[in-house]
Amino acid sequence: MIRMCWRDLQLLESTLPTGCVSRGEYKRVIMPRRYQYAWLHYLFPERMLHGEEGWKLWLETDTASSQAGSSMFLTRVASLLHHRGAIANLSLRENLLLPFLYHGDENALIQAEQDLTEVAVFLGFGDNLDEQAGERSAYTHGIISLGRCMLQKPDIILAQDVHCGMPPHRLQQFRALFLEAMESLQAGLLYLSTSEHDGSGIMFEDSLELTGMDEVAV
């Protein structure tokens, strides 16, 4: 079994209780945006702690465990962050390959380049890879982030309100692509949202809401 686990995470004045999301599972945490940013800080610990007892967030496989921020963790856990996908002055090709250009794994970059055309066609811009990303709409950010995940082929995906702010026609288009990609990847999903009406169209196995000092399961 592959799963991303965490011990009680302090999020400002609230605490996200101990939990995990396994490969193939879809779970959601509903909380204000500022809580989401506090959660994201745990992805990149300021210092790598030695020994599992000190870890707050980590990835488990059948053979090993790796702390958030480690090379293995960043390879097998992908993120779709709110309005954090496209860099406007880069081409669509460069945006999609950006994580691989700085990862230092030449084999991963070669594989991503080989898969790029197929992924771009799926996303709907197969003939426009060398155009600049330009407009930083919610849809552009979401589609670039989704493409990176498809190239990375992670075990777990963390999504932060990625559907939020898209106009209805774009939301419907993105939702169809997102659900098809998730089915293909068979990855686990932890979805951070500000509302239960997030527009994702996803059926979550579990959902937890954090509001101030209160924690309410829904």
Image: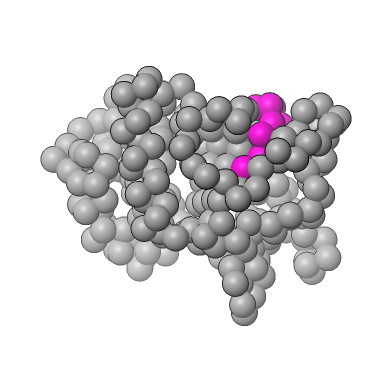
Count of numbered marks: 0
- Magenta stretch bounds: 28-35
In the image: residue 68, left or right of residue 124: right
- What colouring method underlies this structural image? one colour
**Residue that appears at 38% across and 20% down:** 167
Residue 104 placed where, x, y %? Answer: 44, 60
User: Which residue is most to the left?
Assistant: 127
The image quarter containing residue 60 is bottom right
The correct choice, above or below, for 13 with respect to 6 in the image is above
The image quarter containing residue 37 is top right
Q: Is residue 33 magenta?
A: yes
**Residue that appears at 72% across and 35% down:** 209
**Residue that appears at 30% across and 64% down:** 111
Q: Is residue 132 magenta?
A: no
In the depicted view, which residue is nearer to us: 56 or 209?
209
Residue 98 in view, yes or no: no
Residue 121 in view, yes or no: yes
Q: Classify the position of the C terminus by image quarter.
A: top right
**Residue that appears at 68% across and 26% down:** 32
